[in-house]
Image: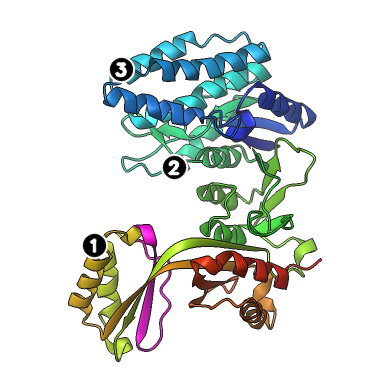
Amino acid sequence: MKVAKFGGSSVADGIQLAKLKDIIKKDPDIKYIVVSAPGKRFDKDSKLTDLLYACKVHIENNLPYDQLFQAIKDRFNAINLSLDTGLDLEDDYNYIIKKIENGCSEDYLASRGEYLNAKVVAEYLGYDFVDAKEFIRFDERGELLEEETNKLLGEELAKHETAVIPGFYGTGPDGKIRTFSRGGSDVTGSLVARAVGADMYENWTDVSGFLVADPKIVDNPKPIGHITYTELRELSYMGASVLHEDAIYPVRAAGIPITIKNTNKPEDPGTVISAGVHEEHKERIVTGIAGTKDFTVIAIKKTRLKSDRGFLRKLAGILENFDIVLEHMPSSVDTVSLIVARDEVDGRIDKVVEELERQLQPDSIEVHESLALITTVGEGMVYRKGVSALLFKSLAEADVNIRIIDQGSSEYNIIVGVDNEDMDKAIRALYDAFITE
């Protein structure tokens, strides 16, 4: 039995929903479906959720929002007309307008795209509509109550042989709508899969799974047929994301594999994500390569740094006081480098350095900007000799200067820092070195 989640591009209009129905018809194992709000139909189109956000902004600034909301209605009415569902959403539209005019929360408004779309898809497929509002629960801080959610969802969905559930939202203890972060419909799908004890969670989108490297950097990179949860986390951290990272945890705990599939090319095998390395890939050294630009390095030097027992505690406290997220912290006997996203310190780097100097009294502090981080990931790396040697050799031959080296404690990845302008060249060199025919 499968749970299938269809993303915004897969439910953008009637044409895409017809593809969804064809996929469901061909696979009777798909019993529960989670949908996003309609996404873009073409490059300059607007996502429906963005139109809803724009409505709220217009109202808050005493600007007319009628045309924006009419565009939302037109999208859904066009879908219903093209699919001949016969569904009348006028009462829902009027209720949402009243809520907007009475100052509804941003979370409520953002969730209505998924809500309306799930009603449309349920009507089109002849499935039951189950509102996530009643069964996905958050605490007062907006954190998911996973066990309570699992219990409520499991009990409710046991009553439905087939159902469509809107993604992205649930409710807080005050009964008001709460949403996940953007892309959170993936999380809803994962929660549903766990609650019903699915054998597979399929995530349908507009790409045929993961690729070894970014196709904007490497020409025709190889697809990844299978990837482990650990490898996926490492690659997603560097921006190689097709799946919301929090969607991994519920299914991972339940031992449910995920398959990333392409709604426009359902015949493509996609990428399977599971706990262990697949037998076919035991000989694989590197699974994927990904990079992200625009990091800042704060290099701190202090003689006998390791002997200063409170040094790291004070350092962590300074970063916390500035609300700065630390990405990496490579160190040596007398030095430590703080690697942070540039936008974390933009406009206040001088104040951060001043506080570091005041509390830590270092010998020197140097700031280096425009650093790119590249991660080379593979669970097979830990068992192979010469991986680091090949990695450094390939970068040297490509005339790439390595500024930072960091290896995860799991030894499943090696991270190098290079200048922003060298990132693409470095990724191509690593791909050529490790990914062979």
Image position of 117 (left or right of 283) = left
Which quadrant of the rendered structure holds the C terminus? bottom right
- Side of 156 where 220 appears, left or right: right
Numbered disc total: 3
Q: Please rate how many residues cluster around mark 3, counting C-alpha atoms within 10 Å: few if below 14, some from 14 to 19, many from 20.
A: few
Of the residues under marks 2 and 3, which one precedes in the sequence?
Answer: 3
Q: Please identify the residue farthest to the bottom as the structure is shown.
A: 304
Magenta segment: does it hold 371?
Answer: no
As helix, strand or loop, the secondary structure at mark 2 comes to: loop
Q: Nearer the viewer, residue 44 or 95?
A: 44
Name the spot of residue 106 as percent of width and height, x first: 35, 31
Residue at figure coordinates x 26%, y 61% from the top left:
348
Kind of residue at disc 2: Ser
**According to the image, label 3 marks what residue?**
101
- Residue at disc 1, secondary structure: helix
Q: Residue 321's mark?
A: 1
Q: CA–CA distance between discs 1 and 2?
A: 24 Å
Mark-to-mark CA distance, 2 and 3: 24 Å
Percent x, y for residue 433? 71, 73
Left or right? Give the position of 56 relative to 155: left
Q: Residues within 10 Å of mark 1 (few under 14, many from 20)?
A: few
Instruction: Tell me, yes or no, whether the two marked residues, 2 and 3, touch with CB atoms within 8 Å.
Output: no
Q: Nearer the viewer's eye, disc 2 or disc 3?
A: 3
Q: Amino acid at mark 3?
A: Glu
